[in-house]
Each structure stands twice: as C-alpha cells, then as structure tokens.
Amino acid sequence: MPAKPAPTSLNKRERGAVLWSIIKKLSVFAKPYHSLIMATLLLTVVGSFAAQVNAFVLRYTVDHLTEILKLSEPWQEGAKLLTTISIVLLLKELLYAAISFGQRYFGEKIRINLSRDLSQKVVARILSYRMGFYTHPDNDSGKLQTRIDLGVSSLTRLVQNFFIDMLPLFANAIVALVVMFSANVWVGMVGLVIVPIYFYISQKQATRLQGFRRQMRHYRESKSEQIISLINAITVIKSFVREPIEAQKHFAIQKEMTDNQLKTRGIGFGYDALKSFIEQIGVVAIIILTAYFVLDGQMSIGMIMFHVLLFQNVASPIRQLHRIYDEVNDALTYAEGFFDILEDDSQIEVVGGVNPATVQGDIELQHVDFVYPNGNQALQDVSFRIRRNRITALVGLSGAGKSTIINLLVKFYQPTQGRILLDGKDLQDYDTHELRQQIGLVLQKNHIFGGTIEENIRYGDLTASQAQIEQAAIQASIHEQINQLPKGYQSEAKSLSGGQQQRIALARMFLKNPPIVFLDEPTASLDAIASQQIKRSLDLIKQNRTVIIVSHNIAQIIDADDLVVIEQGRVVETGTHDELYRKQGKYYEIFNAMSDSLNLDKITQTLENH
Ligand SMILES: Nc1ncnc2c1ncn2[C@@H]1O[C@H](COP(=O)(O)OP(=O)(O)OP(=O)(O)O)[C@@H](O)[C@H]1O
C-alpha cells in the first residue's frame, strides 16, 4: 500500500479534492437510501420555513398589541389576539415536532444503515484478500481494526452531522437570511456581513485545535494499546512484581491526556466567547438599525423582534461551524485509510479456474523462489517432488523456509519465480477455493473459535450429522473426554486444554477428510503426554493420504517415507531416512543433534534398569 501524505499536510485545494472524492465514494453507499434521503431533504426544507414562524408571530403580536393598546377596551381584542397566536404557535409546534422527529429519524436510519453497509462491505472485502495483506506490517490486527473502526465511525458521523444537525440548521439560516433581505436590504446586509466573520473565526478555531485533536487521538490509541498489552502481559507483570511501574506508566499518559484536554477546552471556550461577542454585536446592530427605521416611520415596532429572531436563526448554525471543520478533518484523516483498505484491488486473492474434481497428490516444485512482501527472501531455487499417498517430511533448522513451502502449497502466497505442479498442472490454474477443499492444514496451534465443541468440529464440514461429528472425535481420540464433560459436545471449546484443543482441530480435519494433509509442527506446543495422545490420531490422518509434515520431532521425522532437507531457503538433500543418514550430510548432522538432545544413553540406561 503506497504511503499517502497525511491529510493535514494537504493544501486547501487538495483537501477539497479529497473531500469531494470521499463524498462521491459515500454516495455510492447512499444509493439504496435515495428515497430516505429525499424525504429527509424535503422535511428539512419544510422545517426551515416552519422555524421562521416564531419571528412572524412575534412581529404580528407586537404590532397588534401596539394598536390594541390605543383602544379604550383593549382586553377584548387582546384576548382574541392571544387566542389566535396561541393556536398558530401550537399548530406550528406540532408540525415542527413531527418534522423534526421525521427528519432525525430518517437521518438516523440513513446513518445506521450506512454504518452497517460500510462495516459489512469492508469485512467481506478483507476476507477476499490474500494472505500477504494480513501479514503486511501496516495491517497487523490492532492497526487494521483501528483503521476500520475509525473509518466507519468518522464517515457515519459526517453523514449524521450533515443530515441531523447541520442540514436543518443551514436550511434555517438560508431561509432566515432571505426573509431578512426581503424585509429590508440593510438588515439583511448585517446578517450577511456577520457570516464571513464567523466563518473566519470558526476556521481559525478548528485549525488551532487540530493539533490538539490529533494529539488526543494519539493519546487515546496509546492508552488502549497500553491497556491491551497490560492484560496480555499480566503474568510477566505479576511474576516480576511490576504492578506499580505499570500503573505509573499509565498515569503518565493519563496526565498528558488531561493537560491536553484542558488546553483544548480552554482554547475552544475562548473562541466560543469571541463568537458570541460578535453575535451580540450583530444583535445590537440589528436593534439600532431597525429602531432607526421605526423612528423614521419606515417600519413598525414589531420589526425589532422580527429581525432579532431572524438574525438568531442565521447565527445559530454558524456558531457550530467549527464542528463541521472538525468532522470533515476526521473524515479526511480516517476515510482515506478506510477506502484504501476497501479499494485495494491488488490484494484480491487470485482464484484461478480449473476445478480439481479429484486430486491425486503428486506435487512438484520447480525452481521456486519466494520473497515475502517485506523483502525477506525465504526460498531460492527450490525443486523437489512429493509423491502421492506418501509421507514427506520437511527437515531443517529454524527459519530454513519449511513453513513458507507449506504457505505456497496452500496458495496463501504465489512463488516469485518458478512453479508448483499438482498432478501435472500448475497450482495457479486451480480454483483456489476448490483446491483448499482438497487440503487439510494442521498447525502448531490451531484456532479454536468461541462457541461449543460441536460447532468447532463442524467447521470441517458444515453439513455433518451429529454421528459424523462424533466419529471424527473418536478418530481424534477426544470423544470419551468430551462425553465426560457436564455439557458434552455443547461445552465451550475454548475452556479445553491445549492438547484437547489440538485434538478438536484434528477432529475438524477428519471431518473434512481431504486427500492431502499438511502438518506444520502439529505437536510442537504440546507436552509429552499430549503429544503421545495425539500420535494415534496423527497416524490415522496419515493413512491413504499425501502428507507433508514439518517437524522438529525426531520420531515424526523417521516415520516419514521421504525427507527433504532445507537450509537457508534451499533444498540441500532429498531421500529416505536411511539414504540420508548414510550420506552423512546435513540430515546426518541434524539427526545427530536431535538424538543428542534427547540424551539417549541416559534414557536407554533408565529403561534397561527398570
Ligand atoms: N510473514 C512473513 N513475512 C516476512 N518474512 C517471513 C514471514 N514468515 C516467515 N518469514 C521469513 O522467512 C524465512 C523462512 O521462515 P519459515 O517460517 O518458512 O521457516 P521455518 O523453516 O518454518 O522455521 P521454523 O522451524 O522456526 O518454523 C525466515 O527468515 C522468516 O523470518
């Protein structure tokens, strides 16, 4: 993903262009809600006219009261006037309540639906991305989640503020300004002059606060990151008795955060005071101007209230202008990162076309080179064959490239050079999803999903019956233990021990029953007893399948039919255990190191003596 300049470093024109592109992208998501948007806009227009009624009513009341006061019996006419205006105001309030309810409700509906659609789309999209996307350093789980969350929330907040807060206020302001102008050009001019001053101050306020807001975001991220790492590291913290130090570290962030918050508030309040001062100057100017026209006999006295109320309708949305700047800035900051994720076509997994009806399992790597996206060259000119229905072990020291070979065989990555053939056909030509249906992958630690044991095993075949699930559990030597649990197959799978979880993963594999199985250090995270317990299941898995096993376990290696020895990304030896041992090359060296580490002499002695 190419690095883009931070939105804050963009000039005004560039920011405008970015904002426009965000709006265009959002409008695609808004398309299904066209009628809702139209309804909201219509209500907004009607509402903005209704909002001016108070000013008209007040003008009418003041002017009529002035006339009525001149009568000898003012009470009778006064009562009539009060009844009329009460009815008008009541009706207007009822209408306004209905409009603002509809307008808020529709606006909120658009926001909620849009938020759902954006989240759903991005999840569906990243699920279609290749493995390289997930292993890219820019996309580690925390960062990816933050980018998605902040992207969705800033975009939906932009929509929410536009439809629910800003749009009605601005519609009111425009209608009020038009009414002011039609009442008197000079009064209208006062309203119009205040607007750019407000704009200027609001922009200054937003620019001034931008740095603080960015800082605040940074504090929030570090704070949550620190809490997560604290929870993850709790065993180490407690065992080293470092609780006070960790609390102190947290306090340091809290303190900087509160200082920053106070400064932000202080500056915000300062600007708010300045804006309300300017507004009051506007009010005074309107009163003086209208009073002049009244004294000059050009206007009635009711016009004073009329103009002041209209002016307030103009000023109140402008008072919120800095919020728009903030929202837009947030959208500029986060939406780009979000759309980068959403629109990264280069990350879409290549699916291929050939549908492998039945796979035999003859695999051949031809001069394969592989470089990870971060530039790590993991494999160089790797060529070897894997024969069907045999067990092939990949042997090598840590970092040799064994897991990388498995990653290429499952099509998680594509070779940078060379090709991989399966049953004589290039792996790239196979339909990726169909191919993966034919392959089982058992890792050192297999993910167990939150949910029941039954659900976790069923993941291997979503259509499996209960009997098939139990059969798979029997093959994975876990059935009896599951039955002993109070809730049996309905127990929470995550509460099982590591060894039990590994057997649940094997049961999942038995249920899938693929012709090819890759075992990548399947017992490495288990203790001796657990390893021994799953040995029988592994032996069962290996029957009548093409198996590739990566292991540092001597027993699993000598069990294999063929061995491929890898050193620093290159194949250095291939053959059977006996052939390679006799050869006294790299395998001989690794094998001796493994058997020495077992302390065989002592083990044999112990076994002989008892
Ligand atoms: N996602 C990745 N991105 C970048 N480099 C990687 C990635 N995964 C592995 N590597 C690098 O590729 C090389 C081969 O790693 P690989 O995991 O294939 O070795 P391995 O033989 O399976 O090792 P181990 O026995 O420790 O699992 C190493 O140098 C490793 O640092």
Image (cartoon, rainbow, N blue to C red):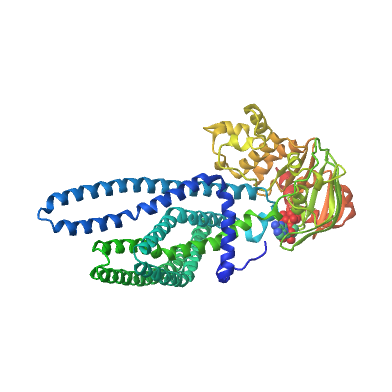
Question: Ligand 1: which quarter?
Answer: bottom right
Residue 43: percent from left, percent from top: 42, 48
Q: Name the side, left or right, on which 10 lies relative to 345.
A: left
Residue 459 visible from this viewpoint = yes
Where 561 sits versus 332, above or below? Answer: above
Residue 143 visible from this viewpoint = no
Residue 100: percent from left, percent from top: 38, 49
Residue 503: percent from left, percent from top: 65, 39
The residue lying furthest to the left in this view is 72
Q: Name the side, left or right, on which 126 lies relative to 111.
A: right
**Viewer-proximal residue among 120 and 273:** 273
Q: Name the side, left or right, on which 83 lies relative to 430.
A: left
Q: Name the side, left or right, on which 346 lies relative to 580.
A: left
Where 90 sits versus 245, above or below? Answer: above
Residue 131: percent from left, percent from top: 69, 52
**Viewer-proximal residue among 262 and 280:** 280
Count up the numbered dots: 0
**Viewer-proximal residue among 434 and 584:** 434
- Residue 465 position by quadrant: top right
- Residue 274 position by quadrant: bottom left
- Residue 594 position by quadrant: bottom right
Identify the image quadrant of the C terminus: top right
Identify the image quadrant of the N terminus: bottom right
